[in-house]
Amino acid sequence: MSSKNKNDREELLRRNYAEIAQLAGGLAHEIRNPLSTISLNLGVLSEDLEDGDTPRDLRMKRRIEIISRECDHLEQILSDFLRFTTGMELETQLCDLSQLVGSFIESQRLEADARQIEISPHLAPDLPRVHLDPHQFRQVLLNLTLNAMQAMPEGGVLEFQTFLQANEVVLQIIDNGDGISKPAQKKIFDLFYSSKPEGSGLGLPTVRKIIEAHHGSIQCESEPGRGTKFTVFLPITLDSQEK
Ligand SMILES: Nc1ncnc2c1ncn2[C@@H]1O[C@H](COP(=O)(O)OP(=O)(O)O)[C@@H](O)[C@H]1O
Ligand SMILES: [Mg+2]
């Protein structure tokens, strides 16, 4: 194939993808509005029933609870989905990864305490800075941390490490939770793959998409029953050492 044909074809694919992503995003928005009306009205219904204690009232309350929970689940899927389809326009700046991870960890202390999870940070000082969109990267940290916490329902240790390796800055998030079976490890980055009843299966695809937009990569190692380690590699560039 000539390089012009190849470029035309790539451009066409890109446009098709953008169109499908826009359509899917639009659809998610359209579903979200009536869904929030349904949720609001369910809230009002359950308030109306608050004092009722006949068997019929109790049955209705239970059903309203189930419908509300399903609405919340749908809302979660839609917001994860919208985050995934939203275009990846990065607003990068030169960032110190250890500082970013350090302040993220502080924001997670309460949640970790509540889940009896001990956070153990090993953050290298003076790392070369990397081009990061802090807002998008926070989403990466959030999704990986939430998964790790969910994998340790009885509590555990969550380790954050940053270090320099060759020409990359590396972040590792290590938990001693449930782990992932070998066959499941092949699927965890697939869209909509989830082993959780309330999962959207969009957390890791979003993580990978954001990291790849930063020209980085992500790897997972896991041992069922022992825990899981996610490693994120971010390239350092010529201007990384500039102060
Ligand atoms: N730290 C982890 N420990 C164990 N399993 C994990 C971990 N992170 C991800 N997984 C597995 O990968 C699946 C996909 O994760 P994700 O894309 O975030 O979707 P979700 O969290 O909605 O299920 C999870 O359902 C879980 O099976
Ligand atoms: Mg998740």
Image (spheres, grey):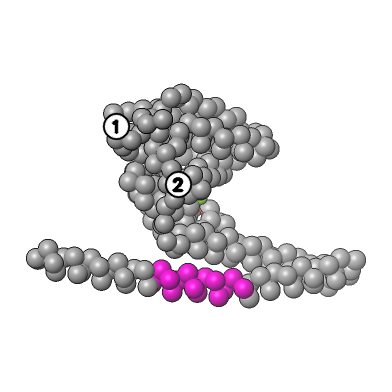
Left or right placement of residue 177 versus residue 186 in this view: right
Contact (Cβ within 8 Å) of mark 2 with mark 1: no
Please state the horizontal and vertical placement of residue 169, each as a whole percent of the image.
37, 33
Q: Residue 133 carries which label?
A: 2
10 Å crowding of disc 1: few (<14), some (14-19), many (20+): few
Q: Give the label, 2 or 1, closer to the camera.
A: 2
Q: Residue beneath label 1, please?
A: 167
| Furthest residue toward front | 243
Horizontal and vertical percent for residue 172? 43, 34
How many labels were placed on the picture? Answer: 2
Point out the residue furthest to the left here.
Answer: 2
- Give, as a three-letter code, the residue at label 1: Asn
On screen, residue 116 above or below 180: above
Q: Where is residue 129 in the image (x, y as percent from the top left)?
A: 40, 33
* Mark 2 / mark 1, whichever is N-terminal: 2
- Magenta stretch secondary structure, dominant: helix
Q: What stretch is highlighted in magenta?
A: 20-33
At 58% from the left and 60% from the top, the residue drawn is 76
Q: Image point 38% across, 72% down: which residue?
A: 20
Real-space Cα separation, disc 2 to disc 1, in angstroms: 19 Å
On the question of residue 166 being in view, the answer is yes
- The quarter in which the C terminus is drawn is top left
Residue placed at 60% from the left, 29% from the top? 118
Given residues 118 and 25, the one toward you in this image is 25
